[in-house]
């Protein structure tokens, strides 16, 4: 009866388990509230912004050797951090998804050296 006892109306509050991931180095992808198909501004829609951030991450991971399905599964199971980065810059909402680089066997950051 905790919900009733602590006057929590609809959604539960919880304490995370004792094992927390401790990552410090991330690659971050951003999305804004513009429909990826029509190009229509969805006016501060964080759902669209977050979807775009995830789609950007998936497309990037595909360039690093993952299939689209593998990238999707990775983002659904890895300790990623999703953030609503801004809803004050009318008309755009901005969301980010941060993926810890330490979960990968090899560095996924592109080589910035010019091709030889």
Image (cartoon, helix red, strand yellow):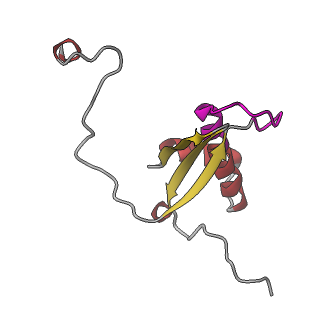
Q: Is residue 10 above or below residue 37?
A: above
Q: Is residue 111 above or below residue 48?
A: below
Question: Relative to 41, is 110 on the left or the right?
Answer: left
Asked whether 91 or 65 is in front, the reply is 91
Q: Residue at x 52, y 41 (%)?
A: 76
Residue 90 x %, y %: 64, 38
Q: Residue at x 27, y 39 (%)?
A: 16
Residue 8 x %, y %: 27, 18
Res 43 quadrant in image: top right
* Residue 48 magenta-highlighted: yes
Q: Which portion, as a residue range, is magenta? A: 35-52
Q: Quadrant of the C terminus?
A: bottom right
Q: Quadrant of the N terminus?
A: top left
Residue 20 x %, y %: 30, 50
Q: Residue at x 73, y 38 (%)?
A: 34
Disc tally is 0
Q: Is residue 99 above or below residue 87?
A: below
Residue 114 x %, y %: 76, 83
Res 51 quadrant in image: top right
* Residue 110 magenta-highlighted: no
Question: Relative to 76, is 12 on the left or the right?
Answer: left
- Residue 62 visible in the snapshot: yes
- Magenta segment's dominant SS is loop
- Residue 70 visible in the snapshot: no
Q: Is residue 71 above or below residue 8?
A: below
Q: Residue furthest right?
A: 38
């Amino acid at each position: 009866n905790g919900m009733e006892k602590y006057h929590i109306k609809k959604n539960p509050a919880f304490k995370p388990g004792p094992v927390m991931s401790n990552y410090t180095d991330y690659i971050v992808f951003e999305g804004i509230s513009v429909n990826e198909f029509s190009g229509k501004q969805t006016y501060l829609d964080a759902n669209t912004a977050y979807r775009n951030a995830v789609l950007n991450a998936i497309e990037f991971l595909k360039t690093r050797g993952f299939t689209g399905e593998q990238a999707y599964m990775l983002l659904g199971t890895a300790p990623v951090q999703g953030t609503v980065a801004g809803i004050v810059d009318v008309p755009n909402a901005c969301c980010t998804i941060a993926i810890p680089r330490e979960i990968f066997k090899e560095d996924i950051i592109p080589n910035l050296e010019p091709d030889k």
